[in-house]
Image: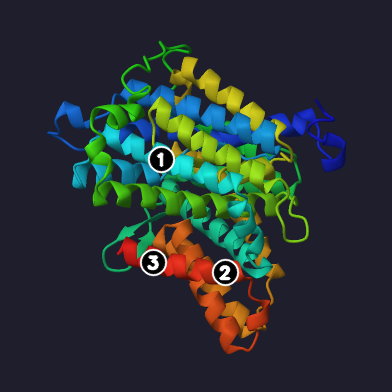
Amino acid sequence: MKKYFQFEELGTSYRREIIGGLTTFLAMAYILVVNPLTLTMADIDGLPDAMRMDYGAVFVATALAAAIGSLFMGVIAKYPIALAPGMGLNAFFAYSVVLTQGIPWQTALTGVMFSGIIFMILTISGLREKIINAIPAELKYAVAAGIGLFITFIGLKNAGIIVNNDATLVSLGDLTNGNTLLAIFGIFLTVILMTRKIKGGIFYGIVITAIVGMIFNLIDTPKSVVGAVPSLEPTFGVAFESIFNSPAELFTIHFLVVVLTFLFVDFFDTAGTLVAVTNQAGLMKDNKLPRAGRALFADSTATVTGAILGTSTTTSYIESSAGVAAGARSGFASVVTAALFVLSIFFFPLLSVITSAVTAPALIIVGVLMVAALGKIDWTRFEIAVPTFLTIIAMPLTYSIASGIGIGFILYPITMIVSGRRKEIHPIMYGMFVIFVLYFIFLA
């Protein structure tokens, strides 16, 4: 096992990988609650039952899709990157595709499955890997730093430290709120543990913060340990129904738009996550991602599998960076995360203690670690500084990794050409320029 996962070469151990895998799971366990609530549109009153997916089935589908995707990534690609149904894409699935466009959720699942199949074809052809390796080093560092700011912003928002303000967009939240104080406690605790160079400091910070939350009645103590496993029948295999029962729904502009949106967003969110996490873990080699094809194949396979099970697009999770910060370096950490997602199906009541206030400190601290990539960018070259800076700042401000990448990919060829460095631009980057221009037009 150690030899297969290259423990000696990576300087890791079972203890580090287990703690890293567990930390990643804790940082992304919220998806087990949030995804079912989103796909069932639980916050929308008066919807016909036919428009809502089954909560229990989506919960099981979410856990299994995360487990299968993480297992593929760990065993096939050997990376400490976990997968689960993506945030943002699930909201697009529910509120844009089903609620606004009126496309049945069964057909929307077919769209997710088709996008995953297209991903697999692009991966097998080697095109996805070539695209990632064609991205210049400066933009890769910008993506890593931008995602660091993005997840820090998410952590601050989840903690209630940063809140919405109609006049200034954002402002300081109520620092006397109990959950906000719990998150602040978690931040200080984790900072102390990390400053003292305690291995697994982020993981221990999560555990201790959760315990403190229960002591002060800010987090509910689980009422039971084991719960009944809901049936997967309402969603399993439904993605195939539209192909056989209503194929006409698949030959419409709306359906094509759905597939292309899933395709674009997942493609570049995944690319950004892979680049950021592997760069943080020190796994990048000469600006190239080893085994990139395997990682991308695992990601696309997870999307197809998730759609068949009954959930929106499954993608690589940036929360994996929390596990890397806790010590994870090999695919064994992803195997650990996968096993925990399977166990979560049976121990769902215990997940009630993992709230946003508990995980927010981990996201914030990981963001601090990830912005270290800023030091690798040559800010004295204006033609590099402009696209990299706007890539970084756009991610938190647009609340989208893909949008930040798109802005950078559009500006990079322009500034390089104007500065007389056209020969340094990889031909694929010109194609990316066109694609992202169309992406923003399409998005509008």
SS for tag 1?
helix
The relative height of residue 264 versus residue 17 in the rendered view (above or below) is below
Q: Position of residue 98 (x, y in %)?
A: 24, 41
Q: Of 370 and 210, which appears nearest the observer? A: 370
Instruction: Identify the residue position indicated by label 2 in the image.
Output: 429
Q: Amino acid at mark 2?
A: Met
Q: Of 385 and 177, which appears nearest the observer? A: 385
Mark closest to the chain's N terminus, 3 or 2:
2
Mark closest to the chain's N terminus, 2 or 1:
1
Q: Residue at x 57, y 51 (%)?
A: 273
SS for tag 2?
helix
Q: Amino acid at mark 3?
A: Leu
* Labelled pair 1, 3 in contact (Cβ < 8 Å): no
**Tag on residue 114?**
1
* Labelled pair 2, 1 in contact (Cβ < 8 Å): no
371 left or right of 257 in image: right
The C terminus appears in which quarter of the rendering?
A: bottom left
Q: Amino acid at mark 1?
A: Phe
Q: Of 245 and 411, which appears nearest the observer? A: 245
* Residue lying furthest right: 8
